[in-house]
Image: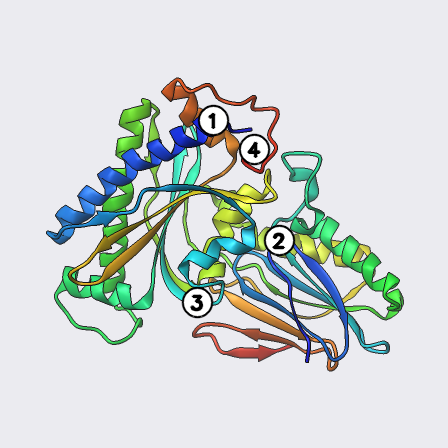
Amino acid sequence: MKIIRVGMGEYKTAKAPALLVSFGLGSCVGVALYDSTKKIGGLAHIMLPDSSLSGKKDFNPGKFADTAIELLYEELKKAGANPKKLIAKIAGGAQMFQLKSNKNIMMIGKRNVEAVKMKLAQLNIELVAEDVEGNYGRTVEFCCDTGELTVKTVGHGIKIL
Amino acid sequence: MFTEIELDALKEIGNIGAGNAATALSMLLAKKVKMKIPEVKVLPFDEVTKSVGGPEKVVTGVFFRVEGELAFNILFIMQPGDTLNLLRVILRESKENLELTPIEESALKEMGNIIASAFVAALADFTGLPLRVSVPCLAIDMAGAILSFPLSLYGYIGDTAFLIETEFEEGLDDIKIHFFLIPDDDKAFSALLNTTGVRSFNENNSSGNGGI
């Protein structure tokens, strides 16, 4: 089986039976989109909520929830997925360190999750499962054959979404 | 954009801070501590975890936010074995696993606190900039998850990571502590450079790739 790694700020698409994997998500969010009729899936590993916050105009769009999901959606359409059939599963968005000061900056994980949900709603993609927030890291594996998103953790078990 | 000279100056600033931090660690352990020459690194976000065992490697992380005239993050990363060796030296107890008691967690945080404060004190002395260090935060988890927060903050302005990295080593008890300084943005590094008299780059012209 082909295993495709999706690093920080990247998004990739694949067809069954490939496995899309992101290792060690902390505040980042893994967003899996899937068309089960065509067995085409995609995974984005987003780092930040909104591209309007970018410090410069020329940036990697894969970093931000809004731009990465938009591009992943377009890529999936190009690859033959039916946009009306797309569903989403997401995991990540943890707050690894609990610092009381400077709350806004510390809660980047939660803000990432909110931004992802907003973008999915805007594209009319149904969010069918999620495993988000908390204070621990996650590795996610998306199987393009079954549509399952496996979430592995250190000390918090394995979940299959 | 950072020139070669500016990168050298950053390395030297890192060296001054890390030297002070190594001395503090040496006093805490009452042992000789070796320090690597700090490196200024520009590399893809995804490759930052390589030096500590990859994104899924379980490690101990002690995190600090530094704020004031400039904002950056300090992160100490230790492998599980090094963590246990360190606890053995500080608390004189032998331990087999990383299920830590509150006292053990507190000891690791305090160790981090002493080294981070020594680093920041040297930086503040040298640059004359007022800096505040947060209380320590501890996490034992995947290296990728631990590094993701400070790396993401830099992600607002950069498409690659830009950081200062070094390592402290106490040989007798086999303790290695990996040190990362990750700025919030390029302004943090240019503010440091401004105080040294090494001309800095135009803050509006932030390429976010360290200029390399």
The chain holding disc 1 is B
- Which badge, 4 or 1, comes first in the chain's sequence? 1
Q: Marks 3 and 4: in contact by CB < 8 Å?
A: no
- Which residue is identified by label 2? A112
Q: Which mark is residue B190?
A: 1
Whether residue A96 is visible to the viewer of this picture, yes or no, is: no
Q: CA distance from mark 2 to mark 1?
A: 29 Å
Residue drawn at (68%, 41%), measured in percent from left and top?
A: A59
- A3 relative to B137, above or below: below
User: In the structure shown, which secondary structural element does the residue marked by tag 4 occupy?
Assistant: loop
Q: Around disc 3, counting alpha carbons within 10 Å, would you say few (fewer than 14), some (14 to 19), or many (20 or more)?
A: many
Q: CA distance from mark 4 to mark 2?
A: 28 Å
| Location of residue B15 by image quarter | top left
Q: Position of residue B140 (x, y in %)?
A: 38, 64
- Which residue is identified by label 4? B211
Indicate left or right for B172 with A41 as reference: left
Check disc 4 and give the amino acid type.
Gly
Whether residue B92 is visible to the viewer of this picture, yes or no, is: yes
Q: CA distance from mark 3 to mark 1?
A: 33 Å
Q: Which mark is residue A69?
A: none
User: In the structure shown, which secondary structural element does the residue marked by tag 3 occupy?
Assistant: loop
Choose between A91 and B33: the one closer to the eye.
B33
- A152 relative to B48, above or below: below
The chain holding disc 2 is A
